[in-house]
């Protein structure tokens, strides 16, 4: 259904729905039944392509970022944008946290940089560590939550920008994907 290429896809926590973020600025929600996918609807409101999205733990809400550095919130059942979502969902528990904008990740941006230097974000399942990948080839580990000026542990192995980072299900390993080097790396976390 998307008119341009897909940047991100993520199942709801109970795997009954799939959210698909497209470069046509929309998020498509599919209902999942076995191997069958039926379009539930489209979430609209972003002014640029979708870069990240997260489901709430109960599967009722989605938070998302786009290329215009917006953080928007949606009700999945009504397919409506929540205009006051940041306030309304301030205590919401998120199944994942991959959005690079939001209260939990205020400190992931180095001083005097714009938001485009941080490419990938992931929160571990223990919810005490945020990992990022940046334009300088670093994988960075921060405490969660973090505030402006937060210190990180930075590790470098990629030859260029890191486009995505992802913790495994047991938080034992962190995976990173390099942009120009097209390399998948596996890092032992502790």
Image (spheres, rainbow, N blue to C red):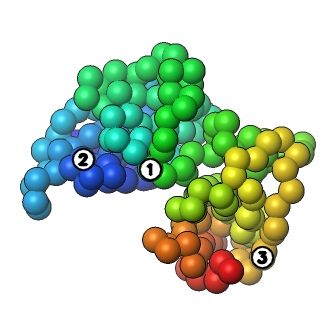
**Looking at the picture, how far across and down is residue 183, in whole percent?**
58, 80
> Which residue is labeled 2 in the image?
17
Identify whether 98 is placed above or below 68. below
Q: Residue at x 86, y 56 (%)?
A: 151
Depth check, mark 1 against mark 3: the one in front is 1
Q: Residue at x 74, y 56 (%)?
A: 143
**Looking at the picture, how far across and down is residue 135, in whole percent?**
74, 60
Quarter of the image for the C terminus: give it: bottom right
Q: Helix, strand, or loop for circle 3?
A: strand
Return the disc, 1 or 2, that comes first in the chain's sequence: 2
In the picture, measured across the screen, residue 10 lies left or right of residue 164, that is: left
**Looking at the picture, how far across and down is residue 188, in whole percent?**
64, 83
In the picture, measured across the screen, residue 138 lies left or right of residue 81, that is: right
> Which residue is labeled 3 in the image?
156
**Looking at the picture, how far across and down is residue 189, in whole percent?**
66, 78
CA separation in Å, label 1 and label 3? 28 Å
In the picture, measured across the screen, residue 144 lies left or right of residue 74, that is: right
Q: Helix, strand, or loop for circle 1?
A: loop
Q: Which residue is drawn at 82% across and 67% down?
A: 153
Q: Helix, strand, or loop for circle 2?
A: strand
């Amino acid at each position: 259904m998307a008119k341009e290429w897909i940047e991100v896809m993520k199942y709801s926590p109970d795997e009954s729905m799939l959210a698909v973020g497209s470069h046509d600025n929309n998020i498509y929600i599919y209902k999942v039944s076995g191997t069958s996918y039926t379009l539930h609807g489209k979430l609209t409101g972003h002014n640029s392509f979708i870069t990240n999205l997260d489901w709430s733990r109960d599967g009722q809400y989605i938070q998302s970022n786009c290329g215009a550095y917006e953080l928007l919130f949606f009700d999945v059942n009504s397919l409506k944008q929540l205009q006051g979502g940041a306030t309304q969902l301030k205590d919401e528990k998120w199944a994942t946290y991959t959005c690079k904008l939001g209260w939990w990740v205020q400190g992931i941006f180095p001083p005097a940089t714009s938001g485009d230097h941080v490419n990938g974000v992931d929160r571990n399942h223990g919810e005490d560590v945020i990992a990022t990948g940046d334009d300088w080839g670093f994988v960075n580990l921060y405490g969660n939550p973090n505030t402006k000026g937060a210190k990180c542990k930075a590790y470098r192995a990629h030859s260029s920008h890191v486009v995505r980072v992802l913790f495994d299900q047991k938080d034992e390993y962190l995976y990173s994907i390099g942009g120009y080097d097209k390399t998948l790396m596996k890092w032992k976390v502790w």
